[in-house]
Image: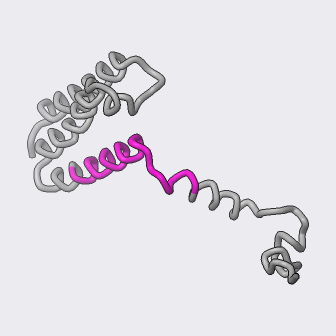
Amino acid sequence: MTPDPRHSARTPAARTGRGRGPVSKRWIYWKRRYSNPTRRDWLLLVCLLWILLAGGVALYDFRLGAFVLAACPLGLAVCRTLPSPIGDVWVNRKPVTDVVTMLAAGGALVLLAVVVPGS
């Protein structure tokens, strides 16, 4: 029986005798972690794309961009009030805490859009 070529002395890990290298370990971790995205990962992606959309709209009009940006935390507050499993993306806090925080952030963005003078 021939030995497996992955275990030959030609590989760097076999020569040093320390097992997998740090880059290889990190790659395996990331591949396993992100091969099956969770609802939280999809929600984060939607939020990041929403921020990019708001930035693009802000190039056209500052106030409209601020309102689009404020819609993201307001939408997240609505998502948090929905029943399980949609509202269970966050797990370690009470829903009231998240809703109040996101409504305050959205309200602050709307207030900022209204208070800042137009160009």
Above or below for 54 versus 111: below
Which residue appears at 9% of the width and 46% of the height? 119
Write the residue at 20% across / 56% down: 56
Q: Position of residue 50 (x, y in %)?
A: 25, 48
83 over 53 or under it: above or below: above
Q: Main secondary structure of the magenta part?
A: helix
In the displayed structure image, the side of residue 30 where residue 41 appears, left or right: left
Q: Residue 55's x, y, as percent?
A: 23, 52
| Quadrant in the picture for residue 89 | top left
Quadrant assignment, res 18: bottom right
12 falls in the magenta region: no
Residue placed at 88% from the left, 78% from the top? 9
Above or below, 12 relative to 101: below
77 or 101: nearer the viewer:
77
| Residue shown at the point (19%, 37%) measured from the top left | 71
User: Start and end of the magenta stretch?
Assistant: 32-53
Q: Is residue 47 magenta?
A: yes
Quadrant assignment, res 59: bottom left
5 relative position to 103: left or right: right
User: Dividing the image into 4 quarters, which one contains the N terminus?
Assistant: bottom right
Q: How is the image coloured?
A: one colour
Q: Position of residue 74 (x, y in %)?
A: 22, 31
Q: Nearer the viewer, residue 53 or 76?
A: 76
